[in-house]
Image: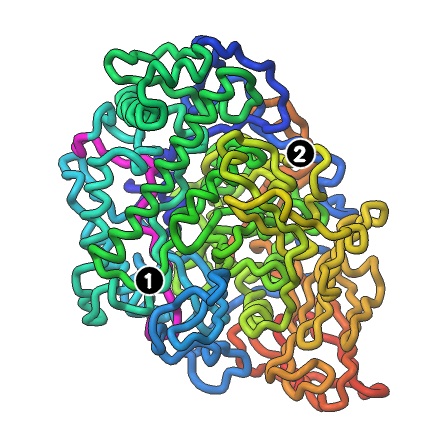
Amino acid sequence: MNLLRSRRRSPRASACIAALVLIAAPACARQAAAPEPASHAARPAINDRGAPEDQPTTRNQEPGAARGRGAATEGIASTGSWPFSYDDQGFKPGALLDLRYLNEKEAGETGFVRLSPDGESFVTGAGKPIRFWAVVSDLYRLPPAEMARHARFLAKLGVNMVRLHTQIAPTGSASQVTDVNEKEIDGIWRAVAALKKEGIYTTLSPYWATDKDAESWGLEGVNGKGGLWGLLFFNERLQQGYKAWVRALYARKNPYTGTPLAQDPAVAIIQVQNEDGMFFWTMQAMKREQQEILGRKFAQWLVKRYGSLEKASRAWEGTKHEKDDFAQGEVGLFITYFLTQPEQGGMAKRLRDQTEFFAETQYAFYRDIADFYHKELGCKQIVNASNWITADPVHLNDVERYTYTADDVLAVNKYTGGVHTGENNGWRIDPGHHFTNQSCLLDPRGFPTNLKQVVGHPMVITESTWVSPEGFQTEGPLTMAAYQSLTGIDTFYWFAAGGEAEYERNPYFTFLNMPGGHPLHKWTCATPGLMGEFPAAALMYRQGYVKQAEPVVHEERTLEDLWDRRTPMIAEDKSFDPNRFTGNSGEKSVVQKGVDPLAFLVGPVEAKYGGSHEKSRVPDLTRFIDPAKKVVRSATGEIQLDYGDGLFTLDAPKAQGATGFLRKHGEIALSDVAIRSGNDYATVAVVSMDGQPLAASRRILAQVGTYVRPTGWQSRPSDFKSDDGKQTFHGFEIVKTGAMPWQIQNTDVTLSLKNPNIMKAVVLDTAGYPAREIPIRRVAGGCSLKLPPDAMYVVLE
């Protein structure tokens, strides 16, 4: 059976099934002995994933908290549950919850999305600020009727941006490098047209250097699948192919709109390529022939810098590499490992030059390809370079981000989730797999929005989610809406939707029968636990209900800091992607005497490259961060996270709510809303629907999310080893993966509102249509109501 055609699935899952190369990353905290600087022969052995063989591949996680706060078992509590179903009713009129009205009548109706005057956010063609609630979707592979329904469904939930993560490079063993995947391009054209009609903009990502059969492309040393990582930045033949691919995509007329994508304002952002860079471990697994091409380019760069290779060697105090052949104009390149290590003397100087050369090469590619889009193809869109990470977030992230500044928008892919082990765990969830189940509220450094932004550029997260089998998922949309707003992260793309037109009705690989059930899809956000929580989150984020703080950390770095890979004031923790690492989770970055990394939850953290150290500034963060009580407060006063007890609260005039382990906290009193939950874990959001403060609003959405699992899902407590066998985790073993429908733990929530205008409460079905009224009790200055067990959405009027 052709697994790729067995059912529609996300590009990420498809790539994994196609035997995606896994890249292991060493722990950045490991203090390795400094290598002998005089010879490349001292390097550590490299495994087939491009990483040092002796490096650990998993994060040190506190095992005692892995089972969740106070939970001896995992799954739906004994209080009961209700089966989730979704009936779109043909999107007929009468829905009380349909956010399509937030979108433009047609995406791009006022022109192309542009950067704001300060360059740090987005505005419409008319110059009006615009925020995007976004997903990555596979809709371009759906039949036309389902594609249209999917676009309408997304708009209803508040989505106004979709990223299409595609592969338009040619397929087949006989293809030429300048050929294109016409079927993929046709799907993209159809999808842009369908989304445009629903007021949804598109971000296009056309290429990913994952396993592709490129043997016939004429790239030296590349035979069969693999070997493409890093080549796009310097290999002129591959660059020629890339230009042919995007010319076919953007310059030709879209038959479904009559307009070439280059001229279509519904396409908002062009992403040059996905998840590749010259400062990641993949560079040290590059084919020998390609290393030699890059080494010759390095030699030319050195001659321009020093006048000759001999003078460069003297500047390096004679530090050699086994591949050096100056007479033939060849210079060896040290593997990525050395860029993550402290060095001295000539070795440090040589690595500095290699770092600067890599950065200039990558920067120049992004600059030149943006010029190609704009000048050659006539594209009027803003451009994002890429979205990747580095081998060492402390010493290399800033130089990677610097190269992105050649284009308009900066991006990263960053997920959150616990440990998940088992065969094929990069793309599916099997009976017998093991996992930890810990709310991100107990791991505040794990929030995807903990990012250092660059002055003068928008920052977006082009892939993220609470990765399954993580069970504490309903916290995701609420916290991301709040922290995006607080920090100014401009767009967060949930990964991934589009396997079906609406929610995942059959999230299983049904062609695989295993004891304990079919494997589950791992990469989907189209579940009631995630996508079901979109409406309130999208509404508050897009309408600007939560304040953005002024920058709480401003760091200025010289370019010499970047080339020398000096330690910054503050660094992000290492991102983790189960598709690209053989370990289990991301590591904590350590910057001795640096800024508290919880500053990311206080307000924006920003960097300026090419600046002056004297202009860096950090306010007194002790007003907001209390490590003794394990509490972090936002600089705006609207957000508080108790990461000791796992409680997040939002208290803004137009949006209030809480998520986490609510029952143990009794009544949670906010300015205009009080929440009392009998659920151990729940998410409650109360949001104005008419733009008025909650105390005066005449139309309010109360949204609830609890714990969600498939019917019949079973797991049991279990200790298990990490993939490398070096760590023990306390978590769970999956016994049965269950079946549809999804089961949602019964809601046990009472709300009180300080609002005299509310006279009735209408429970909605999952599609936003009125189901029934429930009683409310009048209290002094407001009302109180007990939500029914099947409540997900309630409109108060």
Q: Is residue 661 above or below residue 396?
A: below
Q: Is residue 549 left or right of residue 234?
A: right
Please name whichever residue, 522 or 368, is drawn nearer the observer in this view of the structure: 368
Gap in Å between the C-alphas at discs 1 and 2? 38 Å
The magenta stretch spans which residues?
196-218
Q: Secondary structure at mark 1?
A: loop
SS class, disc 2: loop
Residue density around tag 2, few if under 14, some if 14–19, many if 20 or more, within 10 Å: some
Q: Residue furthest front?
A: 307
Horizontal and vertical percent for residue 679? 75, 61
**Quick one: quadrant of the C terminus?**
bottom right
Q: Would you place residue 186 above or below residue 331 in this image?
A: below
Q: Pointer 2: what residue?
A: 590
Q: Residue at x 48, y 39 (%)?
A: 389
Quick check: is 782 in the magenta stretch?
no
Number of the label disc, if any, that sits on residue 381: 1
Q: Residue at position x 49%, y 55% from top?
A: 460
Residue 735 at least partly seen: yes
Q: Position of residue 185 (x, y in %)?
A: 23, 55
Residue 753, image quadrant: bottom right
Label 2 sits on what residue type?
Val
Was residue 204 drawn as part of the magenta stretch in this picture? Answer: yes
Q: Position of residue 641 (x, y in %)?
A: 74, 56
In this picture, residue 567 sits left or right of residue 232: right
The amino acid sitting under disc 1 is Gln
